[in-house]
Structure formats: C-alpha cells, structure tokens
Image: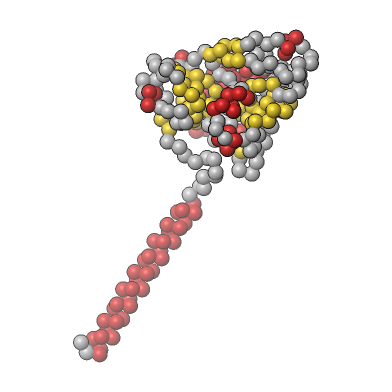
Amino acid sequence: MTGKHKRIFDLVYMAIIFTAGFIFLIIRSKEIKEKKDEPEIPIGYEEYETVEYDPESMGAVKVGDHILFGSYEQDNNTENGAEKIEWIVLDKQEDKMLVLSRFVLDCQPFHMSYTGVTWETCSLRSWLKYDFYLAAFTEEEGDMILTTPVVVDKAKYPQNSQEVENPPESIDDKLFLLSETEANNYFISKEDRICYGTEDCFAQGIYMDSKGVCRWLLRSPGSYYNTVIHVDYNGFVNYLGEIVSRKNENGVRPAMWLKLEP
C-alpha cells in the first residue's frame, strides 16, 4: 500500500469511527430522554404480580399474594372510570380468605360526632356497608363477599353511655376494619403495616408524609372514650388513638372475607 492509499484508508477509517460514534450518541441520548420521561414509581407504589379474583381458581393463592377485586376511584380522574382495587391476602382457610386493601382508599371519620362509640354504632361502619359497598362492587361481586361475625372491642374507658359500656361481642358484617389484635397478628413488622394513599385520597385532603404514607384506622376504641386506635406513619399501632370525629387524619383500608368456592 502506497503512502497516498494509506492516507485515504486512514481518512475513511476515521470517518467510519466518527459516524458510528455519532450514531451511538444519538441513540443513547434518545434512550436517556425516554427513561427520563418515564414516570418514577415512588417507594411503596411498586407493582406486584396480581391475579383477578375468581373463586374457581383461588386455590393456588397464598397468604401475602395480591388479588384484584371490585373497582373504586383512585387516580382522581373520574373520566377514565374507577380503578380495580388491589387486595392483600392476610389469611386463608378451607373455604374463604381474608383480604385487606393494599392502599388507603378513602378518608372518613370513624364517627360523625365527637362522642364515645364502638364499631357497632359508628358512622364509618354504615359508610362501608352502604356507600363504599355500592360504589365498589357489582351485585355478582357482592355475592362473593361473606357476611362474617366481627368482634366488637369494648371501650377501654367508657364514660358517657351504656351503649359503649356494653357492646355486643360480635356483629355481622361484609366489610369491616381490622382490630388492633388483627393488625398485630397479621403483620410481622411495623414496616409491613405502613400504607400509602391514592391520588383520590390526596385530593380529599388526607394527611400524609412526604412519601405519600397515610395513617389508617382500626376498629378498636382508643385509650379515651372518644378515640379510636390507628396505625401511624411509621407502622406502629397507636393505642392512644385519634379523636373519632376527625376525618383528614385517618385513612380507610376495608377488609373482608371472600369465598374460595363459587
């Protein structure tokens, strides 16, 4: 190869290298932009593998799995319809399983008035029974929810009424909140009890921390006659409780028993 030919070869070679590098930079820049444009999933909102609820195929579902059942407004955009509700399986027995909503789905006071109250007569029980139930489930889905005896914890310091002093031991419900005992038994650690809200909850004005964590109500009375126990931002069960008539401080995570057979 002559000197002239070698110089031409070197120029062509350099041109090829430059072109390849330029193309690589364009492709890489596009990839970085697309990655940047992708919405970042905040901690706590990671996607889990879920299965649609079907009583004929729930035999393989295990405690800790996530299922989809019913629909409720969650993204604060009513134009695209209600979103499917994600539930965590807390317990599984021969013919039924206990599920709890993965997210705080709403914020409601435990009771409309500032008074001593137990699960039997609180307004939140009525809200779950009627408002939430009718909004979240079809008639067919409602048939899959079992009516279950729900323990009514007595108030620790009943001060104002015979009704609070002597609630029934249990009352039949399809939808309910976990008790303090259940919240401690079904979750191994406080981290497992940490719960995040939905965009619709945030639009309602629910209190949250910087990551979107919300407190959520339990059905057990607190340490004072007009309070109810809740789970705080760090996943601790707060036994002092929150005043029953406050709304924005407390999120709602419905629980229910579903059929495992048609």
Q: Position of residue 42 (x, y in %)?
A: 54, 44
Q: Position of residue 147 (x, y in %)?
A: 52, 13
Q: Residue furthest right?
A: 159
Relative vertical location of residue 261 with respect to residue 11 in this rendering, above or below: above
Corner quadrant of residue 242: top right
108 or 46: nearer the viewer? 46
Relative vertical location of residue 245 with respect to residue 149 in this rendering, above or below: below
Q: Which quadrant does the N terminus fall into?
A: bottom left
Q: Position of residue 73 (x, y in %)?
A: 54, 30
Q: Residue at x 70, y 10 (%)?
A: 166
Residue 131 visible at all: no
Q: Position of residue 179 (x, y in %)?
A: 61, 22
118 or 139: nearer the viewer? 118
Relative vertical location of residue 28 with respect to residue 44 in this rendering, above or below: below
22 or 262: nearer the viewer? 262
Q: Which quadrant does the C terminus fall into?
A: top left
113 or 242: nearer the viewer? 242
Residue 149 visible at all: yes
Q: Residue furthest bottom?
A: 3
Q: Residue at x 25, y 89 (%)?
A: 4
What kind of colouring is applied to the model shown? secondary structure
Corner quadrant of residue 200: top right
Q: Residue at x 43, y 58 (%)?
A: 30
